[in-house]
Image (cartoon, grey):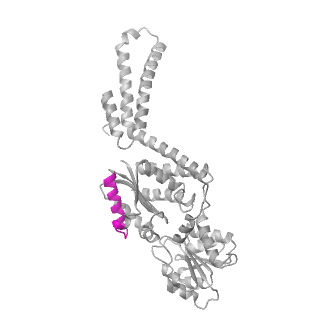
Amino acid sequence: MPILTLGISFRRAPIELLERLSFADDELVKAYRHALDMDAIDEVVILSTCNRVEIYASVSSYHAGFLALKRALTETRDVTADELAEPLYSHWEQDAADHLFAVAAGLDSMVIGETQIHAQVRDALRTAEAERASGPEVRSLFHAAGRAGRRARAETSLGAAPDAFVALGADMAAEALGPLEGHDVVVVGAGRMAGIAVRHLRERGVGAIRVVNRSLERARSLAERTGEGYASLDELPRAMAGADLVVSATGAVAAVIDAPTVRAALTGRRHASLVLLDLAVPRDVEPDVREVDGVHLFDVGAIRERVMSLDATTADEIARAREVIAEEVRRWTVRRRSDALAPLIRAVRARGEDAVRSELSRHAGRLSNLTPQERAAVEALARGVAAKLLHDPIVELKERSEPGSDQLHARLLIELLRLDPDPE
């Protein structure tokens, strides 16, 4: 079955829409069940990150698949079809592969070449496999995307440091605070992004860092790995009261910092201002926090605007990465066609073998006086001629089997050679 991708990303969707579309881990279970209940969808993988929500599926047809995947988004997220109309994009077959390979290579990220997305693509497949939602079609696509991403980074200078996104946010914070050296920081969250933030800020020479998280055990684990302090989320206002910068990167489905929390933290503090850097989608900080006096709030939307104004890498390196991706897309396409055409190719080769056996049998009398070595040589020659004659039609069949024309060429070959291949 063909591959279809439906998605929304930071390039055309406002942060508010991405927040509502984003899937928490426990919501993916329901989403996979809902998608697989639709007749048009056979296999599916959902890629949900801070900057995109994309569904890759093996579908019965483009039209039926498009409608089914769109329904899967609208019926499992708090969005309407009208809200998706402008930012929604779709990719079919080779275009779907090209898009996913570019995503895995970091070419479609806010920070070109960022490495975190490669792991997110891999993890998306693992989650789909755990939910028994993937299959050979999408599994092959995602494995090939992983290879394309690795090649693009190995063969070019792309590959922004994992903390590049955090670094941009920290630069914006420094514009409001001045140099970050010596400023005390609270990091809310204890996941991968929070860990990257702690390490990056420590390298920039900030003062004390306190890790705050809903799970005190996870906060302690991150703090002990990095030599920082820690506290539970209940202590957030008190922790914020002594900080100049708050970096939030949780996986919560709702905001964890609101205006009353910020006002409580500012009460009686000596510091002139407080900077909040929200790296999460959905956002951890309520937008109305901006209205609190003395507060500067930078979220993913603000970082996006900054990234758009930067030339993150050279055009030559992007062009080389695109060449790598094109090579990997072709490799995936040829392998996929070969798999799909395998029954027909077996039938073609069997037809050639039948012709060789028939001719050897017809001339058995004339070959009876040959030595075993001579007879083996004649049989090898006959099989070699047959294989050579069939080689070009098989190669051409693979090359010409584009979506939409594959059945046409296959049927023509079946009729010309009078084959009886596997019905599939």
Pick the front one: 216 or 144: 144
Relative to 11, is 218 above or below?
below
| Relative vertical location of residue 395 with respect to residue 164 in this rendering, above or below | above
Q: Residue at x 62, y 78 (%)?
A: 176
Could you tell whether 221 is left or right of 9 in the image?
right
Q: Which residues are magenta?
A: 62-82
Principal secondary structure, stretch drawn in magenta: helix
Residue 153 in view in this figure = no
Residue at the image position 36 percent from the left and 69 percent from the top: 79
Q: Position of residue 220 (x, y in %)?
A: 59, 74
Name the quadrant of the C terminus. top left
Q: Is residue 385 visible?
A: yes
Image position, residue 391 (x, y; %): 44, 28
Seen in the picture, residue 11 relative to 64 is either above or below; the reply is: below
- Residue 63 is covered by the magenta coloring: yes
Residue 299 lies, with reference to residue 413, above or below; the image says below
Front in this rendered view, residue 284 or 220? 284
Q: Position of residue 307 (x, y in %)?
A: 57, 65
Q: Quadrant of residue 279?
A: bottom right
Hey, which residue is sitting farthest bottom in the picture? Answer: 268
